Structures are given as C-alpha cells and as structure tokens.
Amino acid sequence: MKFIEDLRECAEKFGITLDDYRLKQFDTYFGMLIDWNEKINLTAITEPHEVAVKHFIDSLSCHDEKYFSDGASVIDVGTGAGFPGIPLKIFRPDIKLTLLDSLQKRVNFLSAVCDTLSIKDVEIIHARAEDGARQKEHRERYDVAVSRAVARMSVLAEYALPYVRTGGYFLALKGAKFDEEADEAKRAIATLGGKIEKISPVKLPTLDDKRAIIAVKKIKATPKTYPRKAGTPEKKPL
C-alpha cells in the first residue's frame, strides 16, 4: 500500500488524479516489473519511489488532450518495459495502443502485463522500428507516436515519424539535453515530413533534473525511402 499512496501523492503534485482502480493497476504493474526484472533486464530503476516518479509519472508527463483525442491510435516505438505506452493506456483506457519492441523477452513481459491487467485494444509487435514502419498496416496509420529513452532525436525521428499520419504527432520524452537534441534534429525532422511545434519542459515531483516533451507535428507524408534499413539511422543520422 505504501507504493500506492506514494504514487497517488506524486501524481497529485504533478496535477494528475489517479482513482483507486488505476492505482491498483499501477501497483500490479510495479510488482510484475520487479519480479520479471530478476529474470530479464528491464530496468535499472527498482526502488519504489523512483519507479513511481521516473517511470510512471514521467510516462504520463506527455499526456495532453490536444494530442490524445478520444480513441486515438497510439504507437510506442521502442517501448522496452512498456514506457510510456502502458501508463498512458492505464490512464486513458480509450486509446488504441500498439507497443513495438525488438526483443522477444520484453514482448513476452508486455504480453503478460496486458493479460494480467486485462488491458483491451493493445497490439504488441516484435520488430525493429525500421522494419515495422515499412509494413502497410503500420505506416502512417497512427494519430500519435511516443518514445522514451531510445535514441538521440535525429535518429529517433526516423524511427517514429514514418508511423504517424499527416496531421498527427510524434512526442519524444527527453532528458537534460533536449534543446541540443531538438536543434540537431531539425533537418532530419523536416526531411521526414515533420516540424517541431512545441518543447515543453517537465518538472517531476521530488526531482531536480531537466526533462522535456518535444512535440513534432507531421505536416506531410514521409518519403518512401525512409526509414532506411535496420541499423542505418543509428550509424548515419540524417
């Protein structure tokens, strides 16, 4: 119960209200994260308060009704242990969520979490981001793409923007060097059909570090040549 009360308090400090049902879902998710982390490497953050703030509240920091309309289709690119996608889905059950990750062990964990929490309207894809974006059923089909702790912005844009429909958004959850990354990525983002619309600094409860959400609007279709073959964006950023 201590974890639930800590999460409730931190969420309220951040301006988010979590009801008892959602708090119990987060508590179950936390327990599974810790249990599975003993078998597979999911996170270096395991202390309860740090999980509450650095994983759960941080994931919710990108939520804005401007981007997440009712029933929005959302893809979490390189979701890892499910961040930010699963916390967003717990908070907004109406969204249609797709979780994409390249490691089968993590996909197994994500499936177990969604089954245990009885989460509906979730698709889990085992693929490299570059490969998934070339599949007709996923290319430019999503209202929102989100990504956290995956790559520098210039690389991440090539992973994520091909999934977003024209008029949709790519939201990157970034750390202390967000301004530098945003400047560095402007050319890549433009090449891929996007434009940085807003950079919103984030202040998480009990933490003094710098974070921000970089919101990129998709203003035209991504050229068919992108994303390049798997591994190329990281080796040769645009």
Image (cartoon, rainbow, N blue to C red):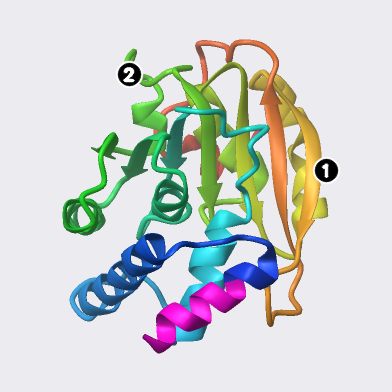
- Give the residue type that dot 2 points to: Gln
The answer to which of marks 2 and 1 sits earlier in the sequence is 2
Displayed quadrant of residue 35: bottom left
Q: Is 165 drawn above or below residue 1 in the view shown?
A: above
Q: Where is residue 133 in the image (x, y as percent from the top left)?
A: 41, 25
Query: Which segment is the magenta one?
Result: 1-10
Quarter occupied by the C terminus: top right
Of the pair 175 and 231, the residue shown nearer to us: 175
Is residue 227 visible to the viewer in this orientation of the structure?
Answer: no
Q: Position of residue 104 (x, y in %)?
A: 20, 51
Q: Is 235 drawn above or below residue 11 in the view shown?
A: above
Q: Is 189 drawn above or below residue 90 in the view shown?
A: above
Of the pair 186 and 106, the residue shown nearer to us: 106
Is residue 72 visible to the viewer in this orientation of the structure?
Answer: yes
Q: Residue at x 50, y 11 (%)?
A: 224
User: Is 109 on the left or on the right of 161, as rendered?
Assistant: left
User: Which residue is labeled 1 in the image?
Assistant: 183
Q: Does the magenta stretch include residue 225?
A: no
Magenta region, main secondary structure: helix
Q: Where is residue 27 in the image (x, y as percent from the top left)?
A: 34, 73
Q: Residue at x 28, y 34 (%)?
A: 121
Crowd rating for badge 2 (residues with CA inside 10 Å; few <14, some 14–19, many 20+): few
Q: Position of residue 201 (x, y in %)?
A: 79, 57
CB atoms at circles 2 and 1 under 8 Å apart?
A: no
The numbered disc on residue 135 is 2
